[in-house]
Amino acid sequence: MRTPPSVGSSTVPETAASDLTAAQDVFVDYFRCPESYAWFESAEDLSSVEGYFTFGEAMAYGRLRGGRVAASPASGLTDATDAVANNGGRLELPFDLAEVVTNLREERYPQTSGGLWERLTATRAIQDAYYFLRPLLPVAVRRHLQRIRLSGWQSIAFPRWPVDSSVDMLMRHTAGVLLRTGQARRLPFIWFWPEGASSCAVMTHDVEGPAGQAFCDELMDLDQSFGIKAAFQVVPEERGTTSVALVNHFRERGFEVNLHDLNHDGYLFHNKPQFLERAARINSYARDFGCRGFRSGAMYRDQRWFDAFEFSYDMSVPNAAHLEPQRGGCCTVMPYFIGKILELPLTTTQDYSLFHILGEHSVARWKAQIDLIRSMNGLISFIAHPDYLIDQRARDVYSALLAHLAQLRDHEGVWMALPGEVDQWWRDRSRMTMVPHGDSWKIRGPGSDRARVAYATLDGDRVVYDVDPQ
């Protein structure tokens, strides 16, 4: 167990060789704080069953000591804060932080069905028929079928809609519990984004058909008119025109290129043997096209199988998947590692869902999601399909979104980045460490010249973050 820093003093504790528990490690990895500040441990006598509870405002799923866990995320859940033990500054959490965070990030909690139609249309025969006919179905027909299948999405209690920050609130609340012991006035950590950016925004375009591909040059012109670069995801098989020449064309214009599934038939993750065979072909295309990133078709996923991919990062996991064919969500607005792969979660509503499922042609919902994500200093990530932006009405809404993002970049300190840049930064940050520097801290490691020291402090009952200017 770590020795806590001196009470109320400016003394900077030494950082010893790592002997962290899994719970301490997930906390240190999230904040990239000195290990000596993780002065807590998890209780050993946890419940034999997993269930829902809360920790402050955060929803949690896992085992709990001294409180009842619930089978569903209904109201009236046990708040585990009341069961935190403080023995002379040595804190004991009544749950395993690593277990709870992993359960949320990797969607290991019970999935909620939207209703009868969703269960009926989830059968193999119905899905086979839909994906066989999908290329022939007009958008209006697809929109009608998907609205029927997704009916009842408003009643899903967890993940929370429209943005779920449970993992991030868990970390923030844990920091607050530590600070309330009085063992330190503030918790130093490596700020989440380079140069002290308040948050990060990423634009991506999934190219799903010939019409969308034909529109890509015009879409690149539109993005560039706002000084924004994006990543294009291309389908390598059964779409007819993906080639090395096309990939090179995107890159020559300063855009990024990643792979989008294998053939977008909805069955990449249907069973493990088929997945492994397809993953090998996907990896081969990634080498041929020089792609570092991946997104599956229709956001289908099984995070347990991601280790078969040779990508550096993935973008297939929604934050809250209420409007996706596969329910769930990773409940975080920050990137996170799944083994060797970095996950860049989708944290906003897809353009198709906005226009054709919700029937909205306005940036209001996107702006509301942006505000929620920015309040947690998170990753604001978008999918805008060339295929669905050909329509002038949709394009006008997208242009308004680009204008808003440009304003946030220019005046609110939001880092507008390509996914590959976020991947490189997050990997660099994961290798950075903080070392004592007088009465303060210095950051060492790859890319540390762009990193900033930040502090978590208490403002009444709230945990707030402050970034040191460089």
Image (tube, rainbow, N blue to C red):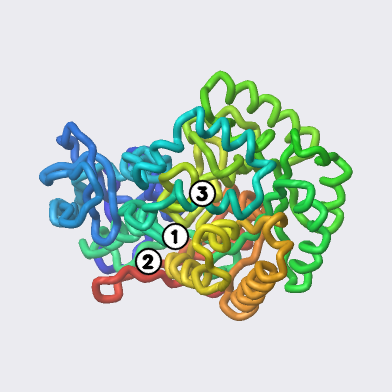
| Badge 1 density bin: few <14, some 14–19, many ≥20, Cα 10 Å | many
**Residue 3 can be seen, yes or no:** yes
Q: Residue under label 3, please give it.
A: 146
Label 2, on which residue? 456
Separation (CA) of disc 1 from disc 3: 44 Å
- Report the side of 388 relative to 304 (left or right): right
Q: Nearer the viewer, residue 78 or 235?
A: 235
> Real-space Cα distance between discs 3 and 2?
44 Å
Q: Is residue 226 left or right of residue 437?
A: right
Rendered-image quadrant of the N terminus: top left
Q: Secondary structure at mark 3?
A: helix
Q: Residue at x 42, y 60 (%)?
A: 163
Q: Nearer the viewer, mark 3 or mark 2?
A: 3
Query: Does any portion of residue 467 appear in the rendered image?
Result: no
Front: mark 1 or 3? 3
Residue name at image x 22 percent, y 64 percent? 180
